Amino acid sequence: MITCEEVLREISNYLDEGLTSELRAQVQEHLRICRNCKVLVNTARKTLTLVADHFVMELPHGVSGRLIERLGIR
């Protein structure tokens, strides 16, 4: 059975459908039983979708200023 570390290493290939059918089946079986890896793969998938769609979200008033201050950019 494939491990969490192996799933992590193959996330990009899995999402790009670049795995052999055997490895893909192993990853899918692992995702069926491992909640942590399933959440990780779903989050990566959603993030890629947002980036690909050029998602822009307006931050609530004051958030960007506090973020810039916290990062020490000013």
Image (cartoon, rainbow, N blue to C red):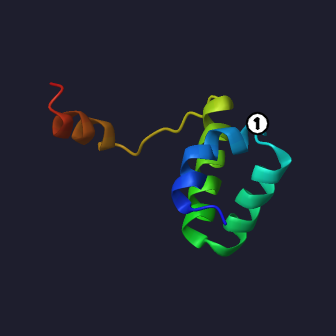
Instruction: Kindly identify which residue carries mark 1.
Output: 18
Q: Does residue 60 appear to the left or right of 48 in the view shown?
A: left
In this orientation, which residue lies closer to the viewer: 61 or 65? Answer: 65
Q: Quadrant location of residue 34?
A: bottom right
Q: What residue is shown at x 76% (from left), y 41% (from top)?
A: 19
Q: What residue is shown at x 56% (from left), y 33% (from top)?
A: 56
The amino acid type found where label 1 is placed reads Gly
In this orientation, which residue lies closer to the viewer: 57 or 25? Answer: 25
Q: What is the quadrant of the N terminus in the image? A: bottom right
Residue at the limit of the structure toward the top, as seen here = 74
**Looking at the image, residue 57 lies above or below residue 35:** above
**Looking at the image, residue 61 lies above or below residue 43:** above
Q: Quadrant location of residue 40?
A: bottom right
Q: What residue is shown at x 67% (from left), y 75% (from top)?
A: 33
Q: What is the quadrant of the C terminus in the image? A: top left
Residue 8, image x, y percentages: 55, 51
Residue at the limit of the structure toward the right, as seen here = 21
Q: Does residue 39 appear to the left or right of 21 in the view shown?
A: left
Residue 51, image x, y percentages: 60, 33
